[in-house]
Image (cartoon, grey):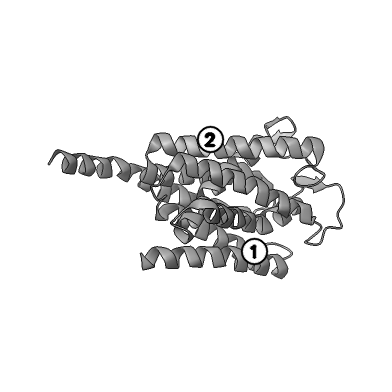
Amino acid sequence: MEQTRSEQAGRVALGPARALGVLSLLTMVGLQVASGLAARPERFTGLIVAVLAVSAVAFAAGAWGTRRALAAFGAAVLTGYAAEVVGVLTGFPFGAYAYSDVLWPQVGGVPLVVAVAWGGMGLAAYAVAAAVVPSGGWARVCVGAAAMTAWDLFLDPQMVRLGLWTWAADDGFYRGIPLSNFAGWLLVSAVVMLIVGRIGGDAPPGRGLLALYTVMAVMETVAFAAVFDPTDPLVAAAGGITMGAFAALAWRRTWQR
């Protein structure tokens, strides 16, 4: 009886976390719509990332508890930030690039909002991997890294378009972005998946984070296909198909179980 009461209390306590996750997700959608229609969409970047992070942490807290959710998010943020600082200073592992002064505040030449984005989407990509590979191990790490890198098929073209960062050479194979960037994303994302998995443990991260990943995939696809001026069907197709495939597989595995 005591165990039953404890479990019931836990479920009641986690309800507000999930509600906050849903509210933040809906707010992010509204901000993305406003951004797509605005003359200066880059002004919405910080707000969108902040709300994304709140949604991700809230959903993770609903599945793992607040402490582990915050620890996993913080570890992903620090990992992403460290990789970005090294990347700006040395060109490894992404290639030679530099941030403009549009995003602020910056520490070590890296906007803090970029590190926060690594944390928020890192949790979402891990949820995809956990659904696809429930047994864990290196297969989960690889799937999570690929799911995270799929997001960058949208992110890099959009941020370069907005002037938030520039590549030293603009002759990359994908909208001026070099192949080394995606190799770097796979590497750093794999580290993020390892760390988040260690902190999260065996408990599944829940469907809220899957919804966050799916909504991001849909919003970005629609934006590049029909909202941005000019539109970019190549990026819409590349990102939409790749992120969509990971999301669809994750939901299918989740429903099967």
Under mark 2, the amino acid is Gly
| Count of numbered circles on the image | 2
Q: Position of residue 234 (x, y in %)?
A: 72, 69
Q: Nearer the viewer, mark 2 or mark 1?
A: 2
Q: Secondary structure at mark 1?
A: helix
Q: Position of residue 239 (x, y in %)?
A: 64, 63
- Does 116 sit left or right of 170 as displayed? left
User: Residue at 43% of width from left, 65% of height from top?
Assistant: 253
- Please, what is the three-letter code of the amino acid marked with disc 1? Gly
* Residue at the outermost left position: 1
Q: CA distance from mark 2 to mark 1?
A: 27 Å
In percent of width and height, residue 191 lies at 60, 44
Looking at this view, is 72 or 157 the one in front?
72
Disc 2 vs disc 1: Cβ atoms closer than 8 Å?
no
Query: Does residue 41 appear in the picture of this structure?
Result: no
Q: Nearer the viewer, residue 148 or 197?
A: 197
Residue in the picture at 54% in, 41% down: 195
Q: Residues within 10 Å of mark 1 (few under 14, many from 20)?
A: many
Is 47 drawn above or below residue 106 in the view shown? below
- From where the camera sits, is residue 216 visible? yes
Split into 4 quadrants, where in the image is the N terminus? top left
**What residue would you read off at disc 2?**
74
Q: Which residue in the structure is indicated by mark 1?
A: 239
Q: How many residues crowd around disc 2 within 10 Å: few (fewer than 14), some, or many (20 or more)?
A: some
Query: Element type at marker 2?
Result: helix
